[in-house]
């Protein structure tokens, strides 16, 4: 498949789907002669353009809306179900037009396969091109939307699209998908490779630190941190205040190596999205997950990771005021350090499947 294109359709919902796709894309570009076609949201692709800049014209970008995903209530991590159904209905009405436009672009290129995480548009493009059609994710939207009580008609349309896959590569923590009747391959955790020199430099500059993120698809008003004297790294969209001698560093929205800041920190406090979980486990950080009711992926991830003894959780309401001494005690009582040693980057396993 060398010198051929691999077309990636990364979800334009949030940021975790893009960063884990970038881990695969970077590995492909470094170890093969493939060309990459990357379709995602303008926001996600702007990040990818910076991250993959050194590969020049080996990557072609296409800015489109590939997914709706979930829609949160304002200043909350809770899902706004009426708005979500409204946006999904409008988005799905445009599927045929969006897919036709993509097929027009790609049909004259030497496309070896289409990889979707986990965009219904990408899957339909792969089907119409007649090339190998691969999905890779830790859930399908059918299970998420069923849990939220969305309409059966809407969910069935997604199910019909997923049935077009030739292979579904499922990451660790995959939500049960008993109605997904396509060939499936289980894989572990992946993330972008850590830069040990960069991590050491961050530690040298900022000292002891914690890392707080609620995902780039969420925006919260205020979080107060008590009983902490180190550096607090926060991703965009979170307003953090701290008592004592703590220093708050809000990482600019265009910070392309947030995973290195995460790996340099002692404790990670995060929304229970798969991408951040993967980065924390592979860098063997203490992981505190935010339990937001009403989101199936988050609930299942938290329950399973707590069962394995590799994470603890707090409620979304607890974010208003976080006592770091209490968090440290919670970690000491519940996280089993040696269990974290079991996780290694599964990137090579994925490349073999492509």
Image (cartoon, rainbow, N blue to C red):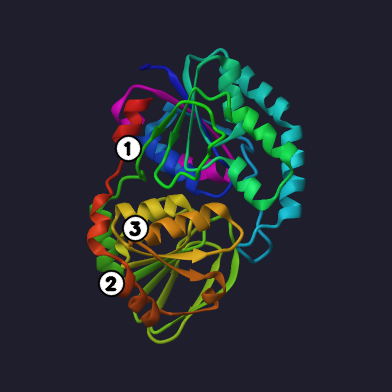
Estimate how packed mark 1 is, as few (under 14), some (14 to 19) or many (20 or more) residues with alpha carbons within 10 Å: many
The residue that disc 1 covers is 347
Estimate how packed mark 3 is, as few (under 14), some (14 to 19) or many (20 or more) residues with alpha carbons within 10 Å: some
- State the residue at coordinates (60%, 42%): 141
**Are dots 1 and 2 in contact, CB under 8 Å?**
no
Res 308 label:
3
Q: Quadrant of the C terminus?
A: top left
Image coords of residue 68 (percent x, y)? 65, 44
- Residue 38 lies within the magenta run: yes
Estimate how packed mark 2 is, as few (under 14), some (14 to 19) or many (20 or more) residues with alpha carbons within 10 Å: few
Report whether residue 257 is seen.
no
Report whether residue 292 is seen.
yes
Compared with residue 340, is residue 351 higher up or lower down, i.e. above or below?
A: above
User: What residue occupies the far bottom of the structure in this picture?
Assistant: 244
Image coords of residue 324 (percent x, y)? 39, 79
Query: Which residues make up the magenta segment?
Result: 28-49
The residue that disc 2 covers is 207
| SS category of the residue bearing label 3 | helix
* Viewer-closest of 201 and 233: 233
- State the residue at coordinates (48%, 39%): 137
Image coords of residue 38 (percent x, y)? 51, 32
- State the residue at coordinates (37%, 84%): 245
- Residue 346 lies within the magenta run: no
């Amino acid at each position: 498949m060398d010198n051929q294109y691999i077309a990636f359709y990364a979800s334009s919902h949030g940021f975790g789907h893009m960063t884990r796709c970038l881990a695969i894309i970077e590995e492909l570009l470094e170890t093969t002669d493939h060309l990459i076609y990357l379709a995602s949201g303008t926001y996600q692709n702007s990040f990818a353009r910076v991250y993959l800049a050194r590969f020049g014209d080996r990557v072609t970008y296409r800015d489109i809306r590939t997914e709706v995903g979930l829609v949160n209530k304002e200043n909350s991590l809770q899902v706004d179900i009426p708005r979500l159904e409204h946006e999904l209905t409008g988005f799905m009405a445009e599927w045929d037009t969006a897919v036709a436009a993509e097929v027009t672009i790609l049909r004259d290129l030497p496309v070896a396969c289409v990889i979707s995480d986990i965009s219904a548009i990408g899957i339909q493009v792969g089907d119409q091109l007649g090339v190998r059609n691969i999905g890779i994710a830790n859930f399908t939207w059918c299970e998420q939307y069923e849990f939220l009580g969305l309409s059966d008609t809407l969910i069935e349309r997604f199910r019909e699209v997923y049935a077009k896959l030739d292979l579904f590569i499922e990451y660790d923590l995959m939500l049960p998908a008993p109605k997904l009747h396509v060939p499936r391959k289980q894989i572990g955790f992946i993330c972008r490779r850590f830069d040990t020199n960069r991590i050491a430099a961050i530690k040298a500059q900022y000292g002891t630190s914690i890392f707080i993120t609620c995902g780039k698809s969420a925006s919260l008003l205020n979080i107060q941190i008590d009983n902490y004297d180190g550096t607090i790294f926060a991703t965009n969209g979170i307003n953090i205040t701290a008592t004592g001698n703590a220093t708050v560093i809000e990482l600019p929205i265009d910070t392309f190596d947030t995973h290195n800041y995460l790996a340099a920190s002692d404790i990670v406090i995060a929304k229970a999205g798969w991408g951040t979980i993967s980065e924390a486990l592979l860098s063997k950080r203490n992981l505190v997950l935010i339990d937001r009711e009403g989101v199936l992926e988050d609930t299942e991830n938290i329950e399973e990771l707590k069962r394995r003894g590799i994470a603890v959780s707090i409620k979304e309401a607890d974010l208003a005021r976080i006592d770091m001494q209490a968090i440290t005690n919670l970690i000491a009582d519940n996280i089993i350090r040696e269990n974290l040693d079991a996780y290694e980057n599964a990137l090579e396993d994925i490349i073999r499947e492509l």
